[in-house]
Image (cartoon, helix red, strand yellow):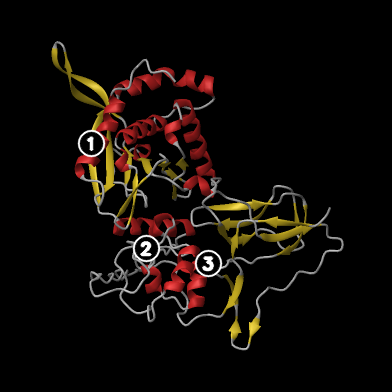
């Protein structure tokens, strides 16, 4: 077998690089076709790179912790006969210390010694996440954490990307490392501030936590850290308001009970309530598109596409949000297939990075855990999220031609959290009421 290079595969249109987390094979080990070779991680999801062919791992071209671009060779496999000896780690030593290769503005790699700013923390006080590549560039160029906090990130949730920091460097003001940290991750132009700039509050230090004998200390795994940082950032970014509506979904419940077996036999898919909830939300978004927006400073970005994220619990207790792209183009069968596929692969940890990015609105089914209602946290950079509660039988007053009557009905709560910077109570309240109206009007004769 000839020697071949293993390239970092394309992981979605919005993903350009990944971090090498763990090598699963050493140099000299045999690897089978499609056997996992290395674990990688983006800012969104962890995954594995399989070997395209069987062979011997001749050389690992990158180390654990390295940030690698899509399409870059990461290893070589081939026959053990005539294999070259493993090359040493490509770190050039100088008289004053090691150098690290970082991308320059023209796309070529250039050596840069460690700058005066010292190591940059993975997360800033505002909750922003900084990738290893961004931290490497910041450290090499002497960009402080304060400056990073002031850069208006163009990535998901305001994340500072490689392009953002490289664009910032030529416009960097002299002495820009000084100054207080911003209280939130609101975009701030990377230019020198003026006297007219509004003062920003200094972030409060986290409270000291005391431990007692017998307490167990559990280190957060990587995904839990990302979730924690994202939730804190969301609360600091958006003033949350939550509106609640109780919906009578008796017709929907009876309709599903009547057709679910036939649906599964015909389509090969289980029919849950989630596809119906998403379709109702999509219809409401079409009627009220100003909840399908994002915020950039004082600019509102009205999104053309309707991409619905659906929060999914993983077996380890972590949360992930796969996204149904162009959800308005799917019928009930297509929506059921998409929901089931994403939910199953989320539980197996098999989602691709591009499948959890690009959402414009999110739904979370807290009823799965028997919860009646909840107050969900907005999934930045979106401005709204809906929680669907458990469907319960309840006595309710219904109007009939013969007068009001008490009957047993299937009812549920819908909770709508929204960003009060751009969604006022009138729109936020009307939206959740409209979703409830769509579910309540579900016809017993509805086809699929």
First in sequence, mark 1 or 2: give its number: 2
- Residue designated by label 1: 430
Callouts 1 and 2 close, C-beta under 8 Å: no
As drawn, the label of residue 136 is none
- Residue designated by label 2: 127
Q: Secondary structure at mark 1?
A: helix
Q: Secondary structure at mark 2?
A: loop
Q: In the displayed structure, would residue 432 be above or below residue 30?
A: above
First in sequence, mark 3 or 1: give its number: 3
3D distance between C-alphas at marks 3 and 1: 44 Å
Q: In the displayed structure, would residue 58 be above or below residue 33?
A: below
Q: In the displayed structure, would residue 146 be above or below residue 346?
A: below
The residue under the point 74% across, 60% down is 76
- Residue designated by label 3: 133
Query: Percent x, y for residue 49?
Result: 64, 53
The residue under the point 45% across, 37% down is 326
**Residue pushed farthest right?**
81
First in sequence, mark 2 or 3: give its number: 2
């Amino acid at each position: 077998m000839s020697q071949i290079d293993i390239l970092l595969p394309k992981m979605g249109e919005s993903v350009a690089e990944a971090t090498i987390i763990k090598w699963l094979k050493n140099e000299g080990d045999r690897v089978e076709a499609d056997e996992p070779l290395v674990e990688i991680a983006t800012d969104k999801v962890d995954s594995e790179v399989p070997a395209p062919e069987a062979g011997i791992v001749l050389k690992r071209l990158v180390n654990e912790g390295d940030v690698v671009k899509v399409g870059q060779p990461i290893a070589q496999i081939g026959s053990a006969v005539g294999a070259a000896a493993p090359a040493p780690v490509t770190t050039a030593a100088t008289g004053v210390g090691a150098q690290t290769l970082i991308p320059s503005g023209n796309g070529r790699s250039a050596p840069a010694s460690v700058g005066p700013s010292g190591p940059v923390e993975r997360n800033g006080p505002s909750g922003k996440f900084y990738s290893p590549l961004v931290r490497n560039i910041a450290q090499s160029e002497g960009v402080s954490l304060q400056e990073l906090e002031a850069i208006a990130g163009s990535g998901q949730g305001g994340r500072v990307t490689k392009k953002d920091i490289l664009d910032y460097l030529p416009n960097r003001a002299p002495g820009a490392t000084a100054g207080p940290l911003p209280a939130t991750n609101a975009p701030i132009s990377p230019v020198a501030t003026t006297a007219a700039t509004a003062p920003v509050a200094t972030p409060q230090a986290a409270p000291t936590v005391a431990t007692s004998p017998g307490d167990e200390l559990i280190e957060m795994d990587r995904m839990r850290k990302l979730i924690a940082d994202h939730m804190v950032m969301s609360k600091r970014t958006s003033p949350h308001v939550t509106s609640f509506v109780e919906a009578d979904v008796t017709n929907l419940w009876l309709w599903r009970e009547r057709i679910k077996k036939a649906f599964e036999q015909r389509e090969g898919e289980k029919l849950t309530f989630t596809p119906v909830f998403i379709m109702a939300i999509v219809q409401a978004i079409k009627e009220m598109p100003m909840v399908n927006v994002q915020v950039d400073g004082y600019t509102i970005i009205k999104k053309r596409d309707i991409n619905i994220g659906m929060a999914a619990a993983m077996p380890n207790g972590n949360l992930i949000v796969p996204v149904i792209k162009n959800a308005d183009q799917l019928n009930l069968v297509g929506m059921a297939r998409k929901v089931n596929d994403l939910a199953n692969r989320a539980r197996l940890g098999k989602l691709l990075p591009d499948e959890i990015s690009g959402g414009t609105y999110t739904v979370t089914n807290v009823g799965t855990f028997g919860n009646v209602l909840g107050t969900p946290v907005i999934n930045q950079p979106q401005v709204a999220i809906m929680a669907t509660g458990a469907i319960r039988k309840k006595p309710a007053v219904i109007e009939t031609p013969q007068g009001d009557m008490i009957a047993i009905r299937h009812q549920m709560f819908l909770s709508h959290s929204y960003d009060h910077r751009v969604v006022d109570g009138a729109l936020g309240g009307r939206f959740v009421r409209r979703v409830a109206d769509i579910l309540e009007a579900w016809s017993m004769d509805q086809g699929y």
